Image (tube, grey):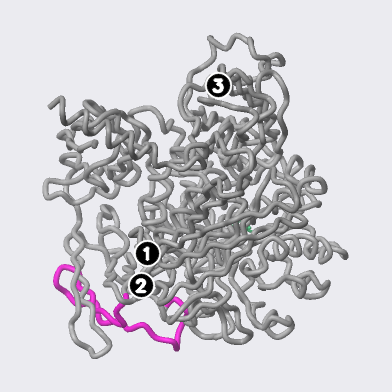
């Protein structure tokens, strides 16, 4: 035994000794634990010896506002939303989620840099995003300021650190002004903060740029530009770069010596034979590992992950990835994670992306701001293309205290950080410089657009730039749309053709589409198509026929993508419901405070529309979905339309064995008839609804049955994942359902459940997807919304997590999950 441990020690020492100098110096770690937080101004809180012992202990990422309470008066905005055509100011309740995100908050934490040597090292603090107006202090001195809450930024803090290696005190002051947002922005250090230690001469943050100037199946040319900091002009630098595939195999290698001139980056070309190309269907990645030496001594080592793929926008023909035309099947995502608020959690983002992919989505627009790095990394790994967006306003205000206050001084810095941060990610296929910016209609708006687009082109000549435009008459007349590389129209589908004809690019992208509104599991009668429909219960109908005055139903966008080569596809508003913007219940309509645009609700439970998108976007996989539910006590004998969303062209419907006839999708009628099967005259009687689907040859292909559920009997817990890792704050998502004796969901049940999580896990949050629910996400009880909700559990240590749900009149639901 003793001999074995000595051997392990020797092996360990051996491998440590074989580490290069550079490897030993470059280190990075996140500052997650041991933060102190306090809401409110405290002028002395930046000082080293400030007493913060009474402050709350928190972990970062942290969102100070998500714990509520919800209140109508939180950031109540009395405004006219001009982009929605409003002329008179009204009370916009719930616009930013009704959560207390406004005000000042302070965070403090001590941190050490082990072995710190100010002569030989540089230390940086990297913020993935801080909401907002961040003022950063180290050891009582101000290090820097970064106003935009969504962007990543960093400061070199080497000269602020204690040279003797003792603990340093970090303090961050954040401030959110009221009326600074159109949705829930979150609050605080809601993304990760990292310490980065490098050798003095080093590759800076985002200091490499990998491009693939030539891509074919036979070979790809890979160009790598590497910057260096703190090195004198005229120095001869040797750089050895290896490209590895994800199994760790070296597929290309090159060593060059270059004299450093005028700060020009080191540049290398390598060739990868038979490259594995990146695409949503096969997201292959590579890693470029560069070792930099001066006079034979290793100085720094830097790793960049990238992908090999070719993107082209061809006039009249569309978008091509690796030579193959495809239409964007994209969704817009706001950054909040429902009940978790804006606080970044990798597994929660992964779950959202997986749900989108399973629906057939292949692209994400990070509306209307820079995303968390975790999202872009996951899109690289999982295979989703990304439009990284920057701003919701430029120099002209949308919100009284919005970004326009900073635009002149900060727009360039913000864009530079965004592009440099994400330009090596194969998933990123476009930059967006803005969304519906009021500057669209300024006479010189095109100049501002040019200023921003030029920055993107300068920092990344390989990608085109777009913007979400909604003032179509303005942008077609004033040169704004003609200036921007890729024409992005938000809604206004009836003007696509005009945009295509008039603009030089001869392509139109649906940068924002749909804005169909619905509440999961709520159905209104009679079933009618309508804009801005208001129902007494402040819920939109899940029949998926209600939209906004400026928007449309999913079929308009499907048809545009299907019928014209020059359309580029779409980004639906939105993949998930988000906090804030409870349209159409946004005007004096408290308690509504979260959106109804989502294809999936705030709890992450798909609405019926999910299956409509899936039936069109993923035709190779079977979709056979019946709506509404079949529990309509009191509607016996009344017309209760039944819809079926399916990838098959036709189906026959039976109610209690009686055929309701066969329907076939067709182009001759309404657009709905082209993409949905609808039995508008179905009469409700309790029992069984059966649908039999037929393929294009008329052969029976699939069958599905929907029953009227019986009396609520017990609670069922359906974990989405069976086990979760303790590392990395992985979360378990558990679907909780009130079911009858047979296990069928009771679709009208709204009772309150309580939760108990014991053993190796802890209760984290709960959400039911009801846009008007004021119950707190972080209390272990909540009402189900139409029979369902989602419980979120975290792992404390390895072992079994015991999860229990109880409710009056029902048998308990229990499950055991493993934490590892
Ligand atoms: C768009 C806007 C989005 C959202 C959406 C709601 O005009 O770009 O941010 O407000 O409308 O339909």
Q: Which mark is residue 762?
A: none
Residue sitting at the far right: 443
Q: CA distance from mark 3 to mark 2?
A: 48 Å
The image position of residue 739, as x and y in percent, is: 19, 45
* Marks 1 and 2 in Cβ contact (< 8 Å): yes
Residue sitting at the far front: 295
| Residue interval drawn in magenta | 647-672
Q: Which mark is residue 109?
A: 3
The C terminus lies in quadrant: top left
Tell which of 280 and 210 is nearer to you. Answer: 210
Q: Which residue is mark 2?
A: 618
User: How many numbered marks appear?
Assistant: 3
Q: Which mark is residue 359?
A: 1
The image position of residue 775, as x and y in percent, is: 42, 32
Q: CA distance from mark 3 to mark 1?
A: 42 Å
Tell which of 264 and 764 is nearer to you. Answer: 264
Q: Residues within 10 Å of mark 3 (few under 14, many from 20)?
A: many
For residue 485, which quarter of the picture?
A: bottom right
Q: Is residue 203 above or below residue 590?
A: below
Q: Residues within 10 Å of mark 2 (few under 14, many from 20)?
A: some
């Amino acid at each position: 035994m003793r001999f074995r441990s000595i051997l392990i020690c020797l092996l360990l020492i051996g491998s440590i000794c074989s580490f290069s100098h550079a490897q030993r110096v470059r280190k990075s770690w996140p500052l997650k634990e041991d933060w102190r937080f306090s809401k409110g101004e405290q002028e002395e809180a930046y000082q080293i010896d400030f007493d913060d012992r009474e402050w709350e202990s928190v972990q970062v990422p942290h969102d100070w506002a998500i714990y509520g309470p919800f209140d109508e008066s939180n950031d109540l905005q009395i405004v006219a939303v001009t982009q929605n055509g409003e002329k008179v100011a009204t009370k916009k309740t719930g616009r930013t989620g009704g959560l207390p995100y406004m005000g000042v908050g302070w965070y403090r934490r001590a941190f050490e840099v082990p072995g710190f040597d100010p002569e030989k090292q540089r230390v940086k603090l990297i913020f993935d995003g801080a909401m907002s107006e961040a003022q950063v202090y180290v050891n009582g001195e101000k290090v820097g300021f970064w106003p935009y809450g969504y962007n990543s930024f960093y400061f070199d803090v080497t000269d602020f650190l204690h040279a003797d290696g003792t603990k340093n005190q970090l303090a961050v002051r954040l401030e959110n002004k009221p009326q600074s947002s159109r949705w829930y922005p979150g609050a605080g250090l809601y993304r990760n903060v990292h310490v980065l230690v490098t050798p003095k001469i080093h590759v800076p943050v985002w200091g490499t740029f990998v491009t693939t100037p030539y891509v074919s199946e036979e070979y790809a040319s890979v160009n790598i530009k590497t910057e260096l900091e703190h090195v004198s002009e005229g120095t001869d630098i040797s750089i050895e770069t290896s490209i590895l595939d994800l199994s760790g195999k070296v597929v290309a290698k090159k060593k060059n010596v270059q004299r450093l001139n005028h700060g020009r980056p080191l540049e290398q070309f390598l060739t990868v034979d038979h490259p594995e190309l990146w695409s949503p269907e096969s997201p292959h990645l590579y890693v470029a590992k560069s070792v930099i030496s001066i006079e034979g001594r290793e100085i720094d080592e830097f790793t960049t992950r990238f992908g090999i793929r070719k993107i082209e926008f061809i006039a009249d023909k569309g978008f091509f990835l690796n030579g193959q035309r495809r239409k964007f099947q994209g969704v817009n995502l706001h950054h909040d994670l429902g009940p978790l608020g804006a606080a970044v959690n990798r597994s929660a983002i992964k779950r959202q992306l997986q749900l989108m992919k399973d629906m057939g989505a292949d692209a994400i627009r990070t509306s209307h701001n820079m995303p968390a790095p975790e999202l872009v990394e996951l899109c690289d790994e999982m295979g989703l293309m990304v439009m990284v967006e920057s701003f919701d306003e430029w120099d002209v205000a949308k919100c009284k205290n919005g970004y326009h206050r900073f635009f002149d001084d900060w727009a360039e810095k913000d864009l530079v950080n965004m592009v440099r941060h994400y330009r090596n990610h194969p998933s990123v296929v476009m930059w967006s410089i803005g969304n519906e910016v009021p500057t669209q209609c300024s006479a010189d708006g095109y100049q501002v657009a040019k200023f921003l687009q030029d920055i993107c082109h300068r920092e990344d000549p390989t990608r085109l730039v777009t913007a979400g435009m909604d003032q179509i008459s303005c942008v077609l007349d004033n040169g704004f749309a003609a200036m921007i590389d890729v024409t992005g129209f938000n809604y206004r589908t009836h003007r696509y053709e005009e945009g295509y004809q008039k603009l030089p690019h001869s392509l139109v992208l649906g940068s924002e589409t749909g804005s169909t509104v619905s509440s999961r599991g709520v159905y209104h009668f009679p079933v009618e198509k309508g804009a801005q429909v208001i129902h007494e219960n402040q819920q939109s109908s899940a029949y998926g026929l209600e939209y906004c005055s400026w928007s449309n139903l999913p079929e308009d966008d499907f048809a545009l993508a299907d019928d014209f080569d020059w359309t580029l596809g779409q980004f639906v508003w939105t993949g998930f419901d988000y906090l804030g913007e409870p349209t159409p219940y946004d005007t004096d309509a408290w308690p509504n405070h979260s959106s109804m645009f989502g294809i999936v609700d705030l709890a992450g439970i798909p609405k019926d529309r999910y299956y409509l998108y899936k039936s069109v976007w993923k035709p190779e996989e079977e979709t056979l979905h019946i709506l509404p539910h079949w529990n309509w006590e009191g509607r016996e004998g009344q017309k209760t339309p039944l819809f079926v969303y399916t990838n098959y062209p036709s189906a026959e419907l039976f109610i209690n064995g009686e055929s309701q006839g066969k329907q076939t999708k067709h182009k001759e009628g309404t657009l709905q008839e082209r993409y949905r099967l609808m039995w508008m005259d179905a009469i409700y009687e309790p029992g069984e609804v059966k649908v039999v689907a037929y393929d294009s040859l008329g052969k029976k292909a699939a069958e599905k049955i929907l029953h009227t559920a019986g009396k609520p009997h017990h609670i069922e817990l359906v974990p989405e994942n069976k086990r979760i890792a303790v590392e990395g704050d992985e979360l378990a998502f558990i679907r909780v359902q009130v079911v009858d004796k047979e296990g069928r969901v009771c679709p009208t049940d709204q009772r309150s459940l309580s939760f108990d999580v014991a053993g190796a896990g802890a209760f984290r949050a709960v959400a039911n997807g009801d846009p008007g629910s004021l119950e707190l996400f972080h209390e272990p009880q909540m009402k189900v919304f139409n029979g369902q909700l989602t419980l979120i559990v975290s792992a404390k240590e390895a072992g079994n997590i015991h999860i229990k749900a109880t409710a009056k009149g029902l048998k308990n639901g229990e499950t055991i999950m493993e934490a590892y």
